[in-house]
Amino acid sequence: KNTMMRKIIKEYCEENPGSPVEGVLDVLVGNVGFVFTNGDLGYVREQLESNVRPAPARVNGIAPIDVIVPKGPTGCDPGQTAFFQ
């Protein structure tokens, strides 16, 4: 979806040079979602923020904070450590 949004906006800007939409291309980095409304922006923002859920960890992901695991026994026998891989 994100690639398609960037492609469509880029094509629109090429067909309509000088459009204020050109500024949007610079900020379309990573996963982006658009919300269109005629309603109160404060209410819409509250609704969006109330539905934020933490994402599960991903392979090769970078933690937003330092994670320190102290040395010591895990309480698991060697056959139960597969989930650490």
Image (cartoon, rainbow, N blue to C red):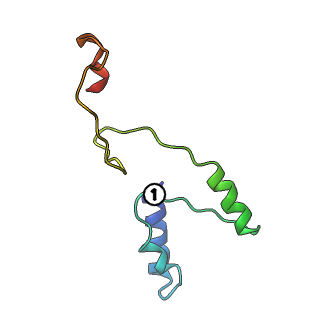
- Is 59 on the left-hand or right-hand side of 7? left
Q: Quadrant of residue 53?
A: top right
Judging from the image, what secondary structure is the residue with disc 1 in? helix
Indicate whether 46 appears above or below 40.
Answer: above
Q: Quadrant of residue 38?
A: bottom right
Q: Residue furthest bottom?
A: 18
Residue nearest the viewer, comparing 82 with 72: 72
- Residue at position x 27%, y 11% in the image: 77
Q: Residue 83, position in %: x, y?
A: 32, 23
Q: Residue 16, position in %: x, y?
A: 51, 83
- Is 45 on the left-hand or right-hand side of 61? right
Name the residue that disc number 1 marks: 2
Q: Residue 40, position in %: x, y?
A: 76, 68
- Residue at position x 28%, y 42% in the image: 60
Binning the other alpha carbons within 10 Å of mark 1 as few (below 14), some (14 to 19) or many (20 upward) gives: few
- Residue at position x 70%, y 68% in the image: 41
- Is 81 on the left-hand or right-hand side of 27? left
Q: Give the amino acid at mark 1.
A: Asn
- Is 66 on the left-hand or right-hand side of 51? left
Count of numbered labels shown in the rendering: 1
In the rendered image, the quadrant that contains the C terminus is top left
- Residue at position x 74%, y 62% in the image: 43
